[in-house]
Amino acid sequence: MIINQDREFMRQAIKMATKGVFSASPNPRVGCVIVKDSKVIGKGGHITAGKEHAEIIALKEAGLDAEGSSVYTTLEPCNTSGKTPPCTHSLINAKVSRVIVAMKDPNPNVNGGGISDLIKAGISVTYGVLEVEAINLNLGFIKRMKYGQPWVRAKVAMSMDGFIALLSGDSKWITRQQARKDGHKWRARSCMIMTGIGTLRKDNPQLNVRSVKTSRQPTKVLIDSKLELDINYSFFDSSQTIVFTSVHSNYDDNQKKQFKDKNIEILKISCNPKFPNHLDLRGVLKELAARGCNELHLEAGAKLSGSFMQENLIDECLIYVAPIFLGKGLPVFQVTESVKSLFDASKWAFSEVVKLGDDLRIILRPCGFDPLGFFHKDSN
Amino acid sequence: MIINQDREFMRQAIKMATKGVFSASPNPRVGCVIVKDSKVIGKGGHITAGKEHAEIIALKEAGLDAEGSSVYTTLEPCNTSGKTPPCTHSLINAKVSRVIVAMKDPNPNVNGGGISDLIKAGISVTYGVLEVEAINLNLGFIKRMKYGQPWVRAKVAMSMDGFIALLSGDSKWITRQQARKDGHKWRARSCMIMTGIGTLRKDNPQLNVRSVKTSRQPTKVLIDSKLELDINYSFFDSSQTIVFTSVHSNYDDNQKKQFKDKNIEILKISCNPKFPNHLDLRGVLKELAARGCNELHLEAGAKLSGSFMQENLIDECLIYVAPIFLGKGLPVFQVTESVKSLFDASKWAFSEVVKLGDDLRIILRPCGFDPLGFFHKDSN
């Protein structure tokens, strides 16, 4: 039975988990709160992959008092040795009497095993307290673990009549400062930021995280099927970049050296049989997931975003709408095939609508998306 | 000094005024509450033009008790004889001691004269209680009285990417039932509903009020510069229709008779010197205001709506947004001239954003619009 007190302490654990929003990847965001006699005696959040898990930080704070305590953790404790020893051992050794878990660990190496081990050791386990909230915090991790792809969030800033730029390409600025700053938060929480060669050519953007504090910059990803990039683009100024290009692209030894010097990795990928001019974007996503990408931030022009939309590869649209009308301009999503009837339109649901200064921020998820179904569905 | 109690009773008077939202035009929406010893002893709302004013209904209910009472009225009492005798006389005769007024009557025949007469008669007058709320209820009446044009509300139903229909013209249905039903409320409150010949040709819509109860249907207005209408369109099935056409349009006696039988009035109007293919829409609006149009509901295609937008003739956008993407389609506003820079974009402000079932309803007003300034500004 889930009681109100359990929800309250789990809420605190979720708050601890959010401390890792910008930095825990490729690990999930996890928080833990240890309670004895209705008092919090230890808490922790998993901040950086490779560093201590949330449960271990909380147990250290609780010390010997952990014996007989209740442990609230947003994710099932691991029973495997990775970069750190299994958390289940530490909990059993600390003689805690109860563990309350928001969600299972979707990692196939754990997947309920941690809970089983705790029960076998005589610890009482309560499952499912604020499960939806915990899932929402880790949609990217779940997508990668269960579906082998990252959670794709397409970011768009547009006018009220659906244009992302004037016909001239001018898009500075459709939205105001508050919305633009908010956009950096979403970049910061992503593992990778993707754009297309067209955007680099037109705007020469850095596409890094500014305006908000973060301990790491996301990896950058470029879709450049004909390998037309210029290594002097601002995009390549910092951190690591992965460039996907067609198997038919060639480059010489001189270029090879330049790419290496700039920390640019070139990955060749086949084309989409249905759209021969497009790279196989599903293959791109699988490759990025294999490299630990939980959340992919897609910030691209109408062409690349349109391909993602047309191939149903977007999990979430993050749309900033400015209260202006342009009349003419570049569309949000450029599609090659027109919808035949309104029945065939791409259907979404308003997940959140908030005013940010003078602009609106709208979050859309696919129509019928249900976090519990997404998490518990057998992906095979 | 405005005290809380005054606000509370004025709120009740405004509630009475809303009873006339669908039917008071061309008169303003007015409500009145009479209070004695902190108790409401009479209330009234002006429901239909030509029928009793709100103050008179409330005074009748209060009877002889009105002596020494406080009268809350959302609009300054009239001191003129129109279809009914002046309300100031009735208030003075009833020996009320105080009148609280939300807003002045912008009718140039009154314009503060009612308040002066009350003061001269020794009645204490408090001005400006919930003035903004009263103004918002009567934006159309104010626009007509002060600016000689109706308040133009452009209604649009569009996809998230800004299309009102597929390229084929198919627009049934972009939004769902709840949004469509809501649209009928806005039609019902308008004095007139305007569309263009293109919409009649494409959709053959009735454009009347259904789904909500109303005692009157708005007058219909058609923009048809070349007089290409077919009298068998559903649009002409009921009530009165005004058709604006170019001074160059001609029709024979047979047509003349048909128009008369169908209650269709043809008005010739000159073209816009800047856009020779367009009728002079400002002239159209002046003509409609002269015929008592407070609120004009514009429900048209991209061309006519685009002309209104381009000529800055829209006071309010009523936009229903469906969470779908079409990729290609017909735009919201078709403009002839492209915006040169983002600085020149048509700038608005989000006045209201609400979820209606699965869709959004967004109300936009011109950036910087301020009801008090709009009301008090010297229009000359």
Image (tube, coloured by chain):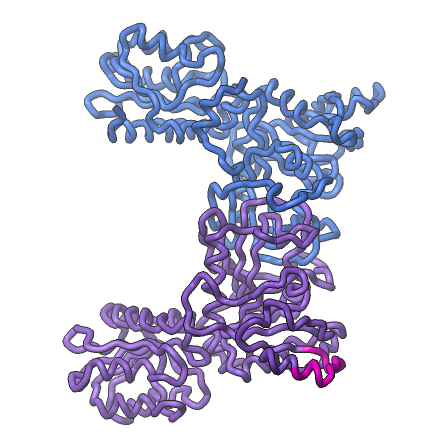
Chain colours: A purple, B blue
Q: Quadrant of the N terminus of chain B?
A: top left
Question: From the viewer's perspective, is B165 left or right of B191?
Answer: right
Q: Determine the residue positioned at 45% across, 71% down.
A: A371
Residue B216 or B9: which is nearer the viewer? Answer: B9
Image coordinates for residue B342, horizontal then vertical, percent: 61, 46
The vertical placement of A34 against A332, above or below, is below
Q: Determine the residue positioned at 71% across, 85% down.
A: A253
Image coordinates for residue B91, horizontal then vertical, percent: 32, 11
Residue B348 within the segment the image draws in magenta: no
Residue A144 seen by the camera: yes
Residue A248 within the segment the image draws in magenta: yes
Q: Quadrant of residue B348?
A: top right
Image coordinates for residue A205, horizontal then vertical, percent: 59, 63
Q: Determine the residue positioned at 33% across, 10% down.
A: B118
Question: From the viewer's perspective, is B280 left or right of A324?
Answer: right
Residue A310 seen by the camera: no
Q: Determine the residue positioned at 76% across, 81% down.
A: A248
The residue stretch that appears in magenta: A245-257
Residue B245 or A27: which is nearer the viewer? Answer: A27
Residue A89 or B123: which is nearer the viewer? Answer: A89
Tell how many labels: 0
The vertical placement of B375 against A122, above or below, is above
Residue B212 or A368: which is nearer the viewer? Answer: A368
Question: From the viewer's perspective, is A26 left or right of A340?
Answer: left
Q: Quadrant of the C terminus of chain B?
A: top right
Image coordinates for residue B17, horizontal then vertical, percent: 41, 27
